[in-house]
């Protein structure tokens, strides 16, 4: 089952909410202050830090599930 459309928006509202919560947690952990809504004023470094933290958390969750 695909939860994403070609416009890269979550089809299932609960999935969208979970992804947003995950993103906000990752941003908080790296000290980036995300706002609800538009965040286009972030620097490339800030946006990259959030994305990198999200990937790190996903890898840790996967590794923890493998044990």
Image (tube, grey):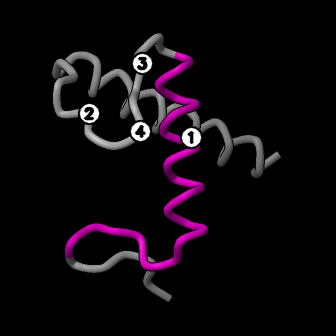
Mark pair 3, 2: CA separation: 9 Å
> At numbered mark 4, what does the secondary structure look like: helix, strand or loop?
loop
The residue where tag 1 is placed is 59
From the viewer's perspective, is 14 left or right of 56? right
Quadrant of the frame with the C terminus: top right
Magenta highlight: main SS: helix
Mark sitting on residue 33: 3
> At numbered mark 1, what does the secondary structure look like: helix, strand or loop?
helix
Mark 4 Cα shell of 10 Å, populated few (<14), some (14-19), many (≥20): few
Mark sitting on residue 36: 4
Cβ atoms under marks 1 and 2 closer than 8 Å: no
Q: Position of residue 11 (x, y in %)?
A: 43, 79
User: Would residue 44 be counted in the magenta stretch?
Assistant: no
The residue depicted at 51 percent of the width and 53 percent of the height is 19
Mark pair 1, 2: CA separation: 25 Å
The residue where tag 2 is placed is 39
> Hey, which residue is sitting farthest bottom in the picture?
1
Q: Which span is picked out in magenta?
A: 7-29
């Amino acid at each position: 089952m695909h939860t994403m459309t070609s416009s890269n928006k979550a089809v299932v509202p609960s999935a969208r909410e979970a992804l947003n919560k995950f993103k906000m947690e990752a941003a908080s952990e790296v000290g980036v202050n995300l706002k609800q809504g538009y965040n286009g004023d972030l620097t490339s470094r800030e946006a990259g830090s959030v994305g990198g933290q999200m990937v790190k958390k996903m890898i840790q969750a996967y590794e923890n599930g493998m044990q």
